[in-house]
Amino acid sequence: MLSNVVIGQYYPAKSHIHSLDPRVKLLAVVVYVAALFVADSWLGYGLTAACLGLVIYASNVPPVYLLRGLRAVFMIIVFTAFLNIFFTPGTRVIFSFWIFTMTAEGLITAFRMTLRLVLLITGSSLLTLTTSPIQLTDAIEFALKPLKKIKVPAHELAMMMTIALRFIPTLLEETDKIMKAQMARGADFDTGGLMKKARSLVPLLVPLFLSCFRRADELAMAMEARCYRGDINRTRMKQMLLTGKDYKALGFLAGYAAAGLLSRLLYS
C-alpha cells in the first residue's frame, strides 16, 4: 500500500511534457483543477478525461504506474462513493433499508464524484512525475514572487513545499521498512479492536519520528555544508525561458479552459 503512492515522486523520461517550462506545468495544473471543479456535465468530464489521456500519452509515463498510485486512496474513493450513493436525496428510489436509501440521483452523483477524484489525483500526480524538485521549486518561487513586496519569504516557502513533496515517498518507504522490521519481531498491526490497533502503532511511530528528525538534521547539515543561504545572491545554472513548445502548450491550455467554460455554459 505505502509503495503505491506516486505523489512526490519523479519519473525520469524524455518527453514533451518533461521538457516544458515548470511554470507552464504549474499553471496547467491550476487551470486543470479549476476546470475539473467547474465541470458539471458529462461533456465537461469527457473533455477533461480526453485532455488528461493526451497529456499522459505525451509524458511517456506508463498509465499502469499512475493507476497503481490510486490504490493508496482507494478507501477514500470507496467511502466517498458510499456516502453519495446512500445519502444523496432523490425522487427515484432504488433501494431502502433503515437509514440507507439508494436513489438514481445518488448513483449518478457518486459516479461523478468518483470520476472527479480519480481525475484530480491522476492529473495532480503528473506535475511531480514530470518535474524535478529543483524545477518545481523555481516554478513555485516564481508564482510567489509578487508576495516578496510585502516581505513574504517566497523562496523559503517554495523550498519547504518542494522538500515536503519530495520526502513523501521517502518517508512512506521508511514507514514500510519499519513496519516490516516490527512485524518480524512479532508486532501485529492487523488484528484486534480499534484501541489495540492504536496501541500497536506506538512501536511504529516512535522510530518513524526519530527517523524524520534524523533526516531533517542531515538535510540541514548538507545545505549548510554547501553554503546555502536562501535567496541571497542565488544564481541558477539553468534559466527558465519560454520556448516555442511552451507557447504551444499555453495555447492548448487556453483552448482547454475555453472549451470547459463553454461546456459549463451550454449545460448549466
Image: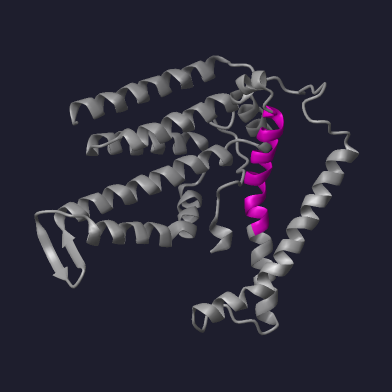
Give the magenta range: 153-171
Residue, x 61% and y 47% (percent of image)?
A: 9
Residue, x 36% and y 21% (percent of image)?
A: 255
The x and y percentages for residue 221 are: 86, 45
Closer to us: 86 or 41 = 86
27 to 128, vertically: above or below: above
Query: Could you tell me what secondary structure mostly forms the magenta stretch?
Result: helix
Quarter of the image where one finds residue 236 = top right
Residue, x 77% and y 51% (percent of image)?
A: 216
The x and y percentages for residue 70 are: 45, 54
Q: Quadrant of the C terminus?
A: top left
Q: Is residue 32 visible?
A: yes
Quarter of the image where one finds residue 53 = top left
249 to 174, vertically: above or below: above
Q: Is residue 210 left or right of residue 24?
A: right
Q: Does the magenta-highlighted stretch encompass residue 59? A: no
Q: Is residue 180 visible?
A: no
Residue, x 72% and y 62% (percent of image)?
A: 209
Closer to us: 233 or 99 = 99
Q: Is residue 164 left or right of residue 267?
A: right
